[in-house]
Amino acid sequence: MAREPKVSLIPLGGLGEVGKNMMVVRYGENILVIDSGLMFPEEELLGIDIVIPDITYLLENKNIVRGIVLTHGHEDHIGALPYVLKQLNVPVYGTRLTLGILGGKLREQHMLDNVKLNCVKPRDIVTIGPFKVEFIRVSHSIPDAVALAIETPVGVIIHTGDFKIDQTPVDGEVTDFYRFAQRGEKGVLALLSDSTNVERSGYTMSERVVGQTFDDTFRESQERIIVATFASNVHRLQQAITTASRYHRKVAVVGRSMVNVVNIACELGYLNVPDGLLVELDEASRLPRNQVVYLTTGSQGEPMSALTRMASRDHRQVEIMTGDTIIISATPIPGNEKLVARVIDQLFKLGANVIYEAVSGIHVSGHPSQEELKLMMNLVKPKFFMPVHGENRMLIKHARLARDLGIPESNIFVGENGQVVELTKRSGRFAGRVTSGRVLVDGLGVGDVGNIVLRDRRQLSQDGILIVVVTISRDSGLIVSGPDIVSRGFVYVRESEQLMEQAKEKVKSALDKCASRKISEWSSIKSQVRDDLSKFLFEKTRRRPMILPIIMEV
Amino acid sequence: MAREPKVSLIPLGGLGEVGKNMMVVRYGENILVIDSGLMFPEEELLGIDIVIPDITYLLENKNIVRGIVLTHGHEDHIGALPYVLKQLNVPVYGTRLTLGILGGKLREQHMLDNVKLNCVKPRDIVTIGPFKVEFIRVSHSIPDAVALAIETPVGVIIHTGDFKIDQTPVDGEVTDFYRFAQRGEKGVLALLSDSTNVERSGYTMSERVVGQTFDDTFRESQERIIVATFASNVHRLQQAITTASRYHRKVAVVGRSMVNVVNIACELGYLNVPDGLLVELDEASRLPRNQVVYLTTGSQGEPMSALTRMASRDHRQVEIMTGDTIIISATPIPGNEKLVARVIDQLFKLGANVIYEAVSGIHVSGHPSQEELKLMMNLVKPKFFMPVHGENRMLIKHARLARDLGIPESNIFVGENGQVVELTKRSGRFAGRVTSGRVLVDGLGVGDVGNIVLRDRRQLSQDGILIVVVTISRDSGLIVSGPDIVSRGFVYVRESEQLMEQAKEKVKSALDKCASRKISEWSSIKSQVRDDLSKFLFEKTRRRPMILPIIMEV
């Protein structure tokens, strides 16, 4: 009997974490990649700009990677592509806005001409190696988002991408229930579904709810209105623009990424702006205060963003005044809570009327709550289920939902990045692991900052560094000049002269000790200086600065 | 006509922030201090352990400080006392548990014998200089909390401390409505009230609600139960202990601060533990899994805490297993959200059943919601109102509540730390400022870490440091030996040899430039090396490490 054909699902990112989403589908000697996202670093990754998936597995199988399909244009789904495509130049498939946003990134990196971008529409079916991929429209907090139905010789795999079920989307383009239901009716091997919001019961509110809140707020506002939101939430921008127009206000756009997205979305027809509504910042500042709305970045309290600078009176073109209304149309991403709270606090202090999280309807999520997740499962009726996009507790809770809906425990796979799930028509199992992990990007360096560098940064950040410079005689080991001590980030030396003098004495006695014991290996001498000084400073200050002895011989 | 007598309210901490609460009441040449709290540092205060109020103003008026009265034993109200009392040894007044907790801290610092602690009971009235201070019972998330009614020659000032209005407190000791109402009826000059929870409408739930949730959870649990909460929440501990006893489980206490508080609270009679209920950890580990409850620290995801170590399988005595129930009876303090989420995620991965924030009734706040704040105002009926304990937006919202209740705008003072509010019987005004601010504590150093040190730590934490060591000839300025480059926290040198070689060439050419131009001032030579190397490294890496040239002459 011939071996049953099998297909493998190999997550390289997005499981056990929120971000850097990347899923591999492998059938024989063919690999299809879904998304290539980045993640913003946890706080302890000092100095790191972004985190991307480790694609060693793809590079080892370079010749069989047939393409990369994209679900939508958010950073956690396309942000790693400039890095990935440099090492793995394969065709990319995505919808128009997704490729529009990606194109902007590739242009900045001078890569646009070298990459093969294939534009698709919802319901298009594209053949990529042995895979036939259909793009199915879903709602999300960015237009042109799609789920994927991937036909393989083993069966159909549906990957939801990020989605919500918005019954009244702003652009009228409802999730394509028919295609999901039809696939479900014909038989689906596996469903991979978005777990981000699985901890919320009920339904996620429609984006249109925010439009109503905008209307209420704009109607009552007597002064300037400033709306901060995610630049990529084009539907949100559309609603702010429409509402501004309704109340005879002009709109000015502030912040680099906001300007970029508004330009791309207008150009591609995803944003509908009445003629003459958009004005430049200097024109806006000359308009009566009740005739202007600013759309700005900074809804996450990012230190360099436009809203943060306005809040700290540090923005050259927009000055907040008493009576201005600031709408923060977003919730803080975990980790940003304090930054956002600080901005809100400063705005209050300036006398502004701030509408934020506490007000219901000022923001809605782009991800599905429990009832939507159940609906998706019941439409698709998969044999196997694999929760994706979420931290472990979310994946586990999503698996419980699937079990409650009747999917047998043995057909549910709560995986980890790098862990292979192998499916045949009849059965599924975990089948080993491939290399996976995170690659840290710091400036132009990709992967050159490792644990040792991070450990050093950690120590430097807590207690600083002391550099001990001393010249000793080659013959006697006795001090010729120094020791001098340079301190950075430890104590302010001018105010700690006595401590520094005592520290020098410690260094001298450490060196004397070495000389008298005829210790001449450099490493031993340095250790002695480091240990003695470290012990002394800890006793005196309860701090442990890094100590770097620089010993020269003459 | 003689000048009208006046009393001044001078906040030295707790306004525009949550933490380091300290309020000064001054009447003529007499000062009374209310609380001396600490604050935990914001993230950007790298390496700082705690933040305490700047008490320059008190030290300048050392001879007229009559005493310090305490409202309750939380760190943000008593945590700065060991520092303050070292500089200002005045009598301290507080209730029994408050002084019990403070006593533990002072003993650790060998200060207990030198400090005059005066124990008071609710309804006691103590004369301190020209002030008569009554202690009035309130509910809070620690027993023995009191508000203060301070009689001054100008009128009565009521400071609520932290409070909530719990109609069914665990110990049966209800807020002393009568005393507040009686004071109100007789006439109160000013009310200073807790703003922490002003953004919540309605009433804060009773502590007893948590007991019900404990009961539901304990009843259903088949394996071990681990309860993590704030050590100081003695009522919460009491409820866990009572519930454990009801379900025939022994209780083991884990974590240093939890052990401390349980000891003090038992000793002073605030915690009622049935004989034989408490067991040691090693005994607990030998008990059947359905016969034990652990009380532990770590509800904030603190990296070194017991629960965090259990979650990462790093606790020697408690190993989490599938089916264990973990109750995290707390909400994350702002800034701790990600730490807490990570611990929860790890516990899920270990197969535990985790009950946390998402479950209603697993935690209740210790602070008053809007209806309680209104009740306090209507009981006390103050002429003047000053919101305290809160960030700016909270103070502003609390002021709005007061206005809604009919206190005239001109009688409401939304202040800042250091800003003096001066009251006569008839009128109030802002009357200048005194020195105030924050003092950073790092290890044993109090105030020795300033902006320059923090700026250095920031730079070191982001991109590390490069130390360039080179010896040049005193006569020619030409290089005798080196340059050598030592890097910490920048790149891992072994993997960046080429970059380091190029960097050395840059240093050489910078020094050559100086030599050929006959530049011989050290500072100019160092600047040249720093600038050239910095520019080169930024071009190559987009990073800006600190560069420290160490140039020796021979």
Image (tube, coloured by chain):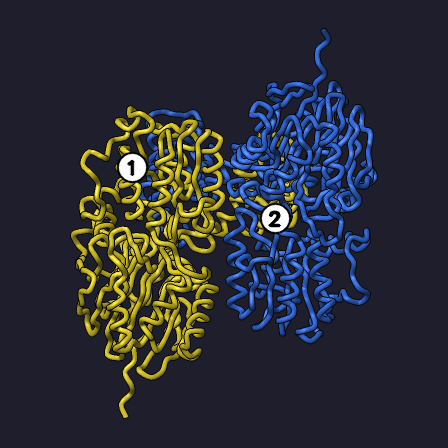
Chain colours: A blue, B yellow
In this rendered view, identify the residue nearer to me: A64 or A18: A18
Residue B213, image x and y in percent? 37, 44
Q: Position of residue B135 (x, y in %)?
A: 23, 64
Q: Residues within 10 Å of mark 2 (few under 14, many from 20)?
A: many
SS of the residue under disc 2: loop
Residue at x 56% of width, y 73% of height: A322
The subunit letter for the residue under badge 1 reads B
Disc marking residue B244: 1
The percent position of residue B164, horizontal first and vertical second, equals 34, 59
Residue furthest to the bottom: B1
Residue drawn 38% across and 65% down?
A: B373
Label number found at residue A204? 2
Chain hosting mark 2: A
Marks 2 and 1, how far apart in space?
A: 39 Å
Q: Residue furthest top?
A: A1
Along the viewing direction, whichever of A153 and A62 lies nearer the viewer: A153
Q: Is residue A443 left or right of residue A451?
A: right
| Residue type at numbered disc 1 | Ala
Residue at 19% in and 56% down: B115
Residue at mark 2 shares a chain with residue at mark 1: no
- Residue type at mark 2? Thr
